[in-house]
Image (cartoon, grey):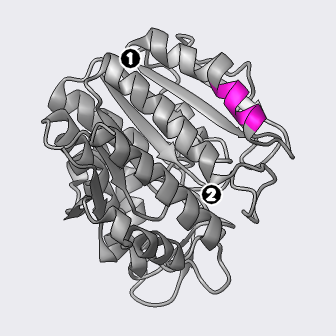
């Protein structure tokens, strides 16, 4: 079966203001590169509008109401120093929720081998009831809870290779023995979490921080010695990927020097584990990536690897 890509024009409607790195051109860059001839065989779907029920499996109802109530009719509303709402933000968020949950449906029901959800804004910094770091709702957590509630997934593994640690995802699953959260990220760097000794209540948190200036060799060593063995031992029913491409050497918000081949490599390794443990079921959701060239080239390498695996190449 082909790789599924979910996206929606609503992602372009979220505007964080002039000069903000999390901008609509990020999605335009991904859509442009995935529109090339080599990606013709992708199965493409519009991300449906997600449900409030899916959000409420993760975030408290008063938090959802507060985000809905903060949405402006015009102009901008600043929720913190980094996180801004515009009139199109809620629509973008709801279709991002729908994209993440629909992708889980597709792979769990056997309608796609794997899926990539090309949405914005990102989500992995969103805490249970706190927006931060460009993020409002934690789409990775929403996808996990949807897989558990709707598809009876017993063990879900998350790999987060965004250059910024996914503090929100870690916090949400800190005490859930049925979810393994693994992260590579630059440290020290925003948001300041992600030390090796942050392990969760059930040793279900796995952090492999990288240092400023680290390159693909350090990234691959961290994955091969720390993260991939833990995912293998966890025997997941589903693998989810927080696919942030801001560890690319061109990215302006960090200082890790990965190239697109590194993202292709880790994608292939995760797909091998998905084949071994969960019938190939893997869902990837876009997180960061703020240099448009680095983002587009890395996303292309990531999806190209998903496609090759889905086709058996």
Q: Nearer the viewer, residue 262 or 163?
A: 262
Kindly identify the residue that appears in the image at 40 percent across and 32 percent down. Answer: 271
Whether the magenta-drawn stretch holds residue 219 is answered as yes
Tag 1 residue: 178
* Local SS, label 1: loop
Picture mark count:
2
Q: Quadrant of the N terminus?
A: top left
Kindly identify the residue that appears in the image at 65 percent across and 56 percent down. Answer: 246
> In the displayed structure, would residue 77 be above or below residue 53?
below
In the rendered view, does 200 fall on the left or right side of 149?
A: right
Extreme bottom residue here?
74
Kindly identify the residue that appears in the image at 22 percent across and 38 percent down. Answer: 107
Q: x, y (%) of residue 6?
A: 28, 60
Tag 2 residue: 133
Magenta region: 217-223
In the rendered view, does 184 fall on the left or right side of 282?
A: right
> In the displayed structure, would residue 224 be above or below residue 109?
above
Q: x, y (%) of residue 298?
A: 56, 57
Q: Is residue 262 visible?
A: yes
Whether the magenta-drawn stretch holds residue 144 is answered as no
Q: Nearer the viewer, residue 76 or 33?
A: 33
């Amino acid at each position: 079966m082909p790789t599924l890509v979910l996206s929606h024009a609503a992602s372009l409607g979220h505007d964080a203001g002039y000069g903000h790195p999390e901008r609509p051109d990020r999605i335009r860059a991904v859509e442009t590169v995935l529109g090339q001839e080599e990606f013709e065989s992708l199965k493409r779907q519009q991300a449906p509008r997600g449900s409030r029920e899916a959000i409420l499996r993760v975030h408290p109802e008063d938090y959802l109401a507060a985000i809905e109530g903060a949405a402006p009719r015009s102009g901008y509303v600043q929720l913190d120093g980094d996180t801004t709402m515009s009139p199109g933000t809620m629509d973008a968020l709801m279709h991002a929720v729908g994209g993440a949950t629909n992708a889980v449906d597709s792979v769990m029901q056997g309608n796609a081998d794997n899926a990539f959800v090309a949405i914005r804004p990102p989500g992995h910094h969103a805490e249970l009831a706190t927006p931060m770091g460009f993020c409002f709702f934690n789409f990775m957590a929403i996808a996990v809870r949807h897989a558990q509630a709707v598809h009876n997934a017993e063990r879900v593994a998350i790999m987060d290779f965004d250059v910024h640690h996914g503090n929100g995802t870690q916090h949400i699953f800190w005490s859930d023995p049925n979810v393994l959260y693994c992260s590579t990220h630059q440290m020290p760097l925003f948001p300041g979490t992600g030390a090796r000794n942050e392990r969760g209540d059930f040793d279900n948190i796995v952090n492999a921080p990288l240092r400023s200036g680290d390159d693909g060799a350090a990234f691959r060593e961290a994955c091969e010695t720390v993260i991939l063995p833990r995912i293998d031992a966890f025997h997941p029913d589903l693998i989810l990927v927080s696919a942030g491409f801001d560890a690319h050497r061109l990215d302006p918000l960090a200082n890790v020097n990965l190239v697109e081949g590194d993202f292709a490599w880790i994608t292939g390794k995760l797909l091998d584990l998905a084949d071994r443990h969960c019938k190939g079921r893997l869902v990837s959701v876009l997180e960061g990536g703020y240099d448009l060239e680095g983002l587009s080239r890395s996303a292309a390498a990531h999806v190209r690897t998903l496609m090759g695996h889905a086709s058996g190449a």
